[in-house]
Amino acid sequence: MSDAPAYLQTLVDRWEPDAFDSPTGRARIRLATTRSDRTWDVTIKDKSASLAPSNADKKPDATLCADAQTWKKICEDVRGGMEAYSRSRLHIRHNLHIGVGFLAATSGQTDPGRLEYHRAKTRRGEISYLQAGVGPKTIVCIHGLGGTKGSFLPTVAALADEYRVIALDLPGFGDSDKPIGAAYDAAYFADAVTAFMDELGIKKTYAVGNSMGGRVALELGFEHHDRVHKLALLSPSLAWLRERKWAGPLKLVRPELGLLQIAPRPIVDGIVRRLIPGADDGWTAAGVDEFLRAYLQPRGRAAFYAAARNIYLEQPHGENGFWTRLSAMETDSLFVWGKKDRLVPIAFARHVEEALPNARHVELNCGHVPQVERPKETHQAVREFFAGTAVREQAATA
């Protein structure tokens, strides 16, 4: 027995391995309490979990830190972990997959709708995913470029009361397989989503996509419309309408160059954190950690470059152009725009309205990740749209 606080030992005593997924079968999770110099490590091995004082010589896969009162609340209320995390009272760093997976496996819940982490073997390789809820209808959430399934934890928490909500890591990202030489374009990713659905026995789903994931969801509407009920598109990536002056040179650059890491890891880490405001706070910090976790792997880097290249090079017009295909899409769609979005400016809404006059639109006072920045308003709009009730045309908040 360790001399750890009782609330930490309670969590480990509730360990349920079937809700947890580690690619190696092992993990080290560091638990810390604010205003205390002592930390404890949970060692996961062979589906068992043990708690002991931290070993400074061993680097943890994930670190969870909260004040004592929050830890006690997490122990008393099985929903406390994700609630504390969403309110920034619990901080998770490094590997979000391992950190949140630990919360899921120590929640004390045993019902079928509990939060769980798994992986599925598909024709596009192994795909990592998390899920919660047991509703009669399913929602599949698709993350953006450089993101992971972790960016949809607020969506899973918000909608799992009525739906089975699944968030996956696309091939090349997060904890899914990262094949060398894969297309990593919208068609490839959409096929991977349908392969995933086939493996889980999901015939038809509601799809929610953010950024590049929104573009993938649109591809489902274009080419696999029989597999989706409706689309909720959160700041979706869309084909550029302005001249792309770097298109020519970029076509000559091979994404496989990403297999080489020219800059040392500390330099890459420093650059990313300087470029992103609030990179060490809350959800943003977790998102940066998730991006770096994949990007600093050769295969993850190659996948990132390939996907980014394809976004930039997508043809806007012509027989197979994005905007031509969008005009012909029949799947019901909701577009959620961020008024402060610098990656997908809200000006795109006008072009979407011209191409899809029957689509619904919601504008929020946020940036590029509405489900994280404005979760209440975003999920209310998505819930109303999927339920077939009226969606407010505009839901701006201060």
Image (spheres, helix red, strand yellow):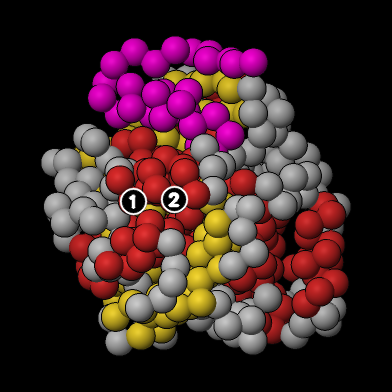
Q: In the rendered structure, which amino acid carries the disc numbered 2?
A: Trp
Question: Can you say whether 107 is above or below 53 in the image?
Answer: above
Q: In terms of secondary structure, where does tag 1 sit?
A: helix
Which one is in front, 163 or 332? 163
Which one is in front, 327 or 285? 285
Query: Is 52 left, or right, of 252 in this rendering?
Result: left
Which one is in front, 101 or 394? 101
Which span of residues is magenta-colored? 371-398
Q: Quadrant of the N terminus?
A: bottom left
Question: Could you say where residue 35 lies in the image, as x and y percent from the top left?
Answer: 63, 53
Would you call the spot at circle 2 few (<14 residues within 10 Å), some (14-19), or many (20 or more)? Answer: many
Q: Which residue is mark 1?
A: 75
Residue contact between numbered discs 2 and 1, judged by CB atoms under 8 Å: yes
Q: Quadrant of residue 121?
A: bottom left
Would you call the spot at circle 1 few (<14 residues within 10 Å), some (14-19), or many (20 or more)? Answer: many
Identify the disc placed on residue 71.
2
Q: In terms of secondary structure, where does tag 2 sit?
A: helix
Q: At x 84% / y 78%, what residue is drawn?
A: 263
Query: Is 311 left, or right, of 187 in this rendering?
Result: right
Q: At x 62% / y 46%, what residue is drawn?
A: 282
